[in-house]
Image (cartoon, rainbow, N blue to C red):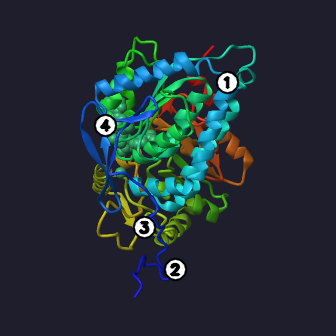
Amino acid sequence: MKKKINNNPFTWNYSPAVETKEHIQINPQYNLFINGKFVKPNSNTFFDTYNPATEEKLAELSLANEKDVNAAVLAANNAYSKTWKKMPAKERAKYIFRIARVIQERARELAIIETMDGGKPIRESRDFDIPLAANHFFYYAGWADKLNYAFPNKTPQSLGVAAQIIPWNFPLLMAAWKIAPALATGNTVVLKPSENTSLTALKLAEIIRDCDLPAGVVNIITGPGSTGSFMVNHPNIHKIAFTGSTHIGKNIQHSIAGTNKKLTLELGGKAANIVFEDAPINQAVEGIINGIFFNQGHVCCAGSRLFVQENIAEEIINKLKARMETLIVGNPLDKNTDVGAINNKEQLSKIKSYLKMGKEDGITLYQTLGELPKKGYFCKPSLFINATQSSRVVQDEIFGPVLTIQTFRTIEEVIEKANNIPYGLSAGVWTDKGSKIFNLTKQLKAGVVWANTYNKFDPSSPFGGFKESGFGREGGLHGLMPYLKF
Ligand code: NAI
Ligand code: MG
């Protein structure tokens, strides 16, 4: 008998369609990628990386200590002054194009590894993360020899070595967001992926080596927060690009105060997704679902606060519940899966503590009825109905598949509530009136505002936040600026 995967009487159960992983090669142990080679860590210490959907160990990763960080920064500085800075820009572009091409060629392998190491559905890593990562390299390769046109009447110059620290929610994509513009502007790189999801960055290191990028131009080192801290505090780096929690972002800003290091921070978010009575309701419901359950809500720009105009609230809530029941939660390697595993154990307990907090605040919690897999870190798609503005489930970034719903009557009221939050990364607006869209995009304090859609990305459009969501932009022409001086 087929296993029942959800309880909705209107849907049928699909047969499993699990992506094969036989051809995937994950080494038992990985070294650090420094100066064009994989080298043993000075620390001689290793840590494990897991598959969060099965709790199985996938590989051992090197823990980079201060000496390892020093070696990586030295390699990047040498490569900068001896090779990369001197190379004609059009030659640098060729290497970046080559990386893009090889990512495309190895896309399937990268997607499977991303899903195994991080828990996201294969459909997402296959159709979103990996193609977009390749596209970032393509896009920035195009800018490399056109910087004078990008910034007319100025003389853009590279900075030196960029220390780049990235999180676990979009591992390869974040690496591409960081590395591609740094290389295009003539800088060299030391990148540290998250300790939970380093495998695709290590695969990228193999790709970079195979593309014959000059030794030391990109160095990829693994380790926990302490490794990141050594990078940030190293005297010979010139630029820091960080994506992660607001707390660590603030720490980094403190620790570099009084130095010449340039900094961009892409931190948390708590986006308002606003639905007006004149919105196309069914599309809006799809957009709301995509906005919060995409990647288990592990998205800094997730549409985690839903605002619905009062007279359509009941209709939207009913449609949302029905749609949520059709979401398939389970094996991330299955092509039918909509909601995969929570990335790590700590994150799952953080989400659970927020579910408890919301209930204690007296907010009604609706969770889908289907069973969760017995093993692995999973969380049911969850809805907090009648949430209150002051509750912590509304104010804090939960970073999980948890949506809060509030209602509003007037535009002024919803703008006031949407902006009344420490974050300002993104927002969504659903209405058939263009004038309302323009009014809101001006008044919402958010770096990105999507209209009648959600979570759309393109390498040519800049992304970044206001307030505690950070500063600086990634993507597009704007994404070149943090890596240049004029
Ligand atoms: P985190 O901010 O601790 O980690 C992000 C990266 O920074 C990792 O590579 C980590 O090793 C590194 N890091 C940690 N401490 C550091 C330090 N002192 N100096 C330099 N680098 C350091 O985020 P974590 O613990 O993985 O997640 C915690 C929360 O952060 C999540 O629950 C979520 O709310 C938020 N988050 C936001 C993300 C975003 O895209 N804005 C991404 C991931 C998490
Ligand atoms: Mg992992």
Nearer-N-terminus badge (2/1): 2
The tag on residue 11 is 2
Nearer-N-terminus badge (2/3): 2
| Three-letter code for the amino acid on which mark 1 is drawn | Ala
Q: Residue 20 location, x and y as percent?
A: 47, 67
Image depth: mark 1 or mark 3 in front:
1
Give yes or no for contact between labels 1 and 3 (Cβ–Cβ under 8 Å): no
Residue that label 3 marks: 329
Whole-number angstrom distance, CA of label 3 to CA of label 4? 29 Å
Indicate left or right for 349 with 170 as reference.
Answer: left
Image depth: mark 2 or mark 1 in front:
1
Indicate left or right for 161 with 152 as reference.
Answer: left
Per the image, label 4 sits on a secondary structure element best described as loop
Residue that label 4 marks: 224
Residue that label 1 marks: 89
Per the image, label 3 sits on a secondary structure element best described as loop
Q: Which residue is depicted at the point 35% across and 39% down?
A: 31
Whole-number angstrom distance, CA of label 4 to CA of label 2? 43 Å
Per the image, label 1 sits on a secondary structure element best described as helix
Ligand 1 under 8 Å from disc 4 Cβ:
yes
Give yes or no for contact between labels 3 and 4 (Cβ–Cβ under 8 Å): no
Whole-number angstrom distance, CA of label 4 to CA of label 1? 34 Å
| Three-letter code for the amino acid on which mark 4 is drawn | Pro
Front residue (pair 449, 265): 265
